Amino acid sequence: MTNTNAPAKNTPAFFAMAGISFAVSLLGLLMAVLYLDADPWAKAFLALGTLFLTTSAFTLAKCVRDNQENQSVVHRLDQARVDRLLAEHDPFRSVS
């Protein structure tokens, strides 16, 4: 019997695709800022904005992942409690 509540595992190909697409998009944006026809202070401002956006995206992804893991643990504990109650329940036992 398979566990339908188990989270899906990412394949190595999906992980590689996500990493490569992130690297390509970040490099493309940094190259666009580098070759932009603007003053150096404007390029520096855009580069700092790019770095801030990148670190914020990592932080948000970590927070979402941690929240999902916490909910998963709580759900498993609740499910274990319900399973235990159902296993201990005897519908034919008389109420005293």
Image (cartoon, rainbow, N blue to C red):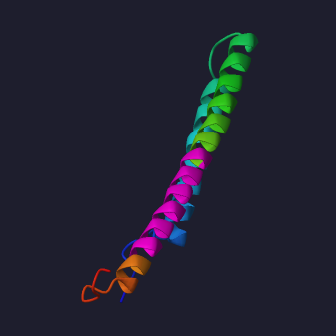
Q: Residue furthest left?
A: 92
Left or right, residue 47 beside residue 1: right
Residue at the spot 69% in from the left edge and 32% down from the top edge = 51
Residue 28 seen anywhere in this rendered image of the structure: yes
Kindly report the secondary structure that dominates the magenta region of the rendered protein.
Answer: helix
Is residue 20 in view from this perspective? no
Q: Is residue 17 above or below residue 35?
A: below
The structure residue drawn at horizontal position 54% and vertical position 64%, both measured from the top left corner, is: 73
Relative to 26, residue 12 above or below: below
Which quadrant of the rendered structure holds the N terminus? Answer: bottom left
Inspect the magenta stretch and tell me whether residue 41 lies in it.
no
Give 89 or 61, whichever is nearer the viewer: 89
Q: Is residue 40 left or right of residue 81?
A: right
- Residue pictured at 56% horizontal, 63% vertical: 16
Please provide percent x and percent y for residue 85: 40, 77
> Vertical placement of 86 versus 31: above or below?
below
- Residue 35 x, y percent position in the rendering: 65, 25
The image quadrant that residue 31 belongs to is top right
Q: Residue at x 73, y 19 (%)?
A: 44
Residue 14 rendering spot, x and y as whole percentages: 49, 64
Q: Is residue 20 above or below residue 16?
A: above
Stretch in magenta: 62-82
